[in-house]
Image (tube, grey):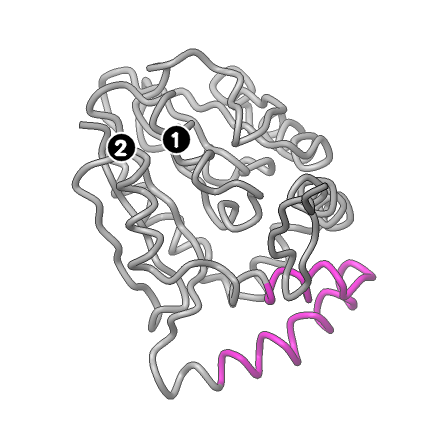
Amino acid sequence: MSAAPQTDFGYARVDLDAKQGLVDDVFHKVAGRYDLMNDLMSAGLHRIWKDVMVTRLGVSRTRPFAHLDVAGGTGDVAFKVVAAGAEAAATVCDINAEMLKVGRDRALKRGLDHRVEFVQGNAEALPFPSGSFDGYTIAFGIRNVPRIQLALEEAYRVLRPGGRLLVLEFSPEVVPGLDRIYDAYSFAVIPQLGRLVTGDAEPYRYLVESIRRFPRPEAFSGMIAKAGFGRVEATAMTGGIVYLHGAWKV
């Protein structure tokens, strides 16, 4: 009998079919304070990175724009999308019910529950018809997907011709000099910050390890192209700590 296929879970190797459950457990633990931790870990920079992503999306201010944000359960990207266009509507798809609950509560408080829909679903098998959306974003979520190539193929499927893909993700390719400071901060500070804010350091130890296991920008661009996308580009931000990957369904 052949061994079960394996994949990375941080620095550990786990069965491919087991990874999703482990990732779900990570985000179940941190859902309530996920956005607060993002603010603390990035000194608020994640908001700027996401603003740049939404600007690149090119949401029409006057025409309808149907958008899908994957792995964005707390709703922060979706709220930015609908704020960018009067006729824009966003669907948030996340596999984690706790994250979605946070997002639904926030949408209701902001009076955006009629423009932002929250759907539980898997990035590898999206519960939407082909050609449903004008835009697809995933911010800091693609590296947690067990089968990244399959998720990119699903992104291609659900986009309309001319649709825009944008992936915001941390990168293992940080500029020399900054890389040592960044590594020291990631491994010494972030897990302890997670312990103070959420009561548990382990989810954040996994998250910083998972960044180092993510494909380098050139390799990830190749994966996007393999999924069928054209005009693939990768833009370094903040010294290569983050890359914004863009492409079109042509």
Q: 28 or 6, which is in the foreground?
A: 6
Above or below, comparing residue 74 to residue 82 in the picture = below
With respect to residue 171, does 33 lie above or below?
Answer: above
Could you tell me how far apart the alpha carbons at marks 1 and 2 are, in whole angstroms? 7 Å
Disc 2 target residue: 228
Residue at the image point whose x is 55% and y is 23% from the top: 111
Looking at the rendering, the stretch of residues picked out in magenta corresponds to 181-209
Three-letter amino acid code of the residue under disc 2: Gly
* Residue where numbered disc 1 is placed: 153
Q: Quadrant of the N terminus?
A: top right
Q: Residue furthest top?
A: 129
In the image: residue 141, left or right of residue 21? left
Is 154 part of what is drawn in magenta? no
**In the image, residue 204 lies in the stretch drawn in magenta:** yes
**As rendered, which of 20 and 141 lies closer to the eye?**
20
Vertical relation: 185 (above or below) 56: below
Residue 136 lies in what quarter of the image? top left
Q: Residue at x 17, y 27 (%)?
A: 250
Name the residue nearer the viewer: 212 or 238.
212
